[in-house]
Image: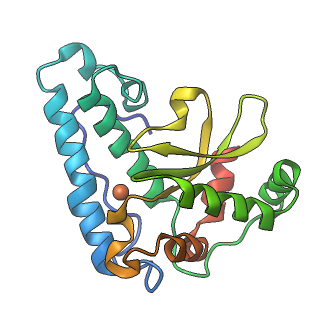
Amino acid sequence: MIKTYPYLLDTLPYAYDALEPVMDKETVMIHHDKHHQTYVDNLNKALAENEQLQVKTLEELLSSELPAVKNNAGGVWNHDFYWEEMTTPGEGHIGESLMRELEKSFESVEEFMKIFEATALGRFGSGWGWLVQNKEGGLEVLSTANQDNPLVDGFKPLLAIDVWEHAYYLKYKNKRADYVKAFWEIVNWDKVEERLK
Ligand SMILES: [Fe+2]
């Protein structure tokens, strides 16, 4: 869906406690209602007096030269994407065509998961881990700092993990590795496959 100014916070596609016990209700509430909402509010604020930017799409704003626009547009886009790709623990299964693509690019699903986990863990400070499709159609894993988005570099995002501490600290404390490992249980693989098509 193409979003433009003024931006609104989407409601979650599930209940706050739907991702329990992998992601606790309080984390989801604070993350969505406070952090995500703040990106929406700050983006609207940054655009309020800039009519030229108000007509741009959210995607176009991701590469803005104005840090307040770029960072908050990224915050809105990335979190929309993240909420959309999760589901109740145990509900998600990797379908055949996605499995084939993962095997083509990483040799096996296990190898892909290992690389994704290492990349998410290796992101120093705040940022995101991503599974993306490159221009040649192959799949790659990469990470971005802060609220940066791989679309800007010509990649098509397929799956994102938020590794800002606000995404996991209440439940996992400083153990980012435990959060990253548990994340697999709540990935909605149908959504990932849909993004690939
Ligand atoms: Fe976040």
Q: Which quarter of the rendered picture does the N terminus lie within?
A: top left
Q: Is residue 114 left or right of residue 123?
A: right
Q: Position of residue 26 (x, y in %)?
A: 27, 78
Q: Which residue is painted at 17% across and 43% down in the image?
A: 41
- Residue 68: image quadrant is top left
* Residue 53 visible here: yes
Quick one: 100 or 143, which is closer to the camera?
143
Q: Which quarter of the rendered picture does the C terminus lie within?
A: top right
- Residue 71: image quadrant is top left
Q: Residue furthest top?
A: 52
Which colour style is shown?
rainbow
Q: Quadrant of ligand 1?
A: bottom left
- Residue 171: image quadrant is bottom left
Q: Position of residue 67 (x, y in %)?
A: 28, 28
The answer to whether residue 155 is above or below residue 114 is above
The answer to whether residue 123 is above or below residue 135 is below
Quick one: 110 or 2, which is closer to the camera?
110
Q: Which residue is painted at 79% across and 62% down in the image?
A: 111
Q: Position of residue 52 (x, y in %)?
A: 24, 13
Q: Which residue is painted at 86% across and 56% down in the image?
A: 103
Q: Is residue 192 left or right of residue 128?
A: right
Q: How many marks?
A: 0
Q: Is residue 10 left or right of residue 119?
A: left
The answer to whether residue 138 is above or below residue 70 is below
Q: Is residue 16 left or right of residue 142?
A: left
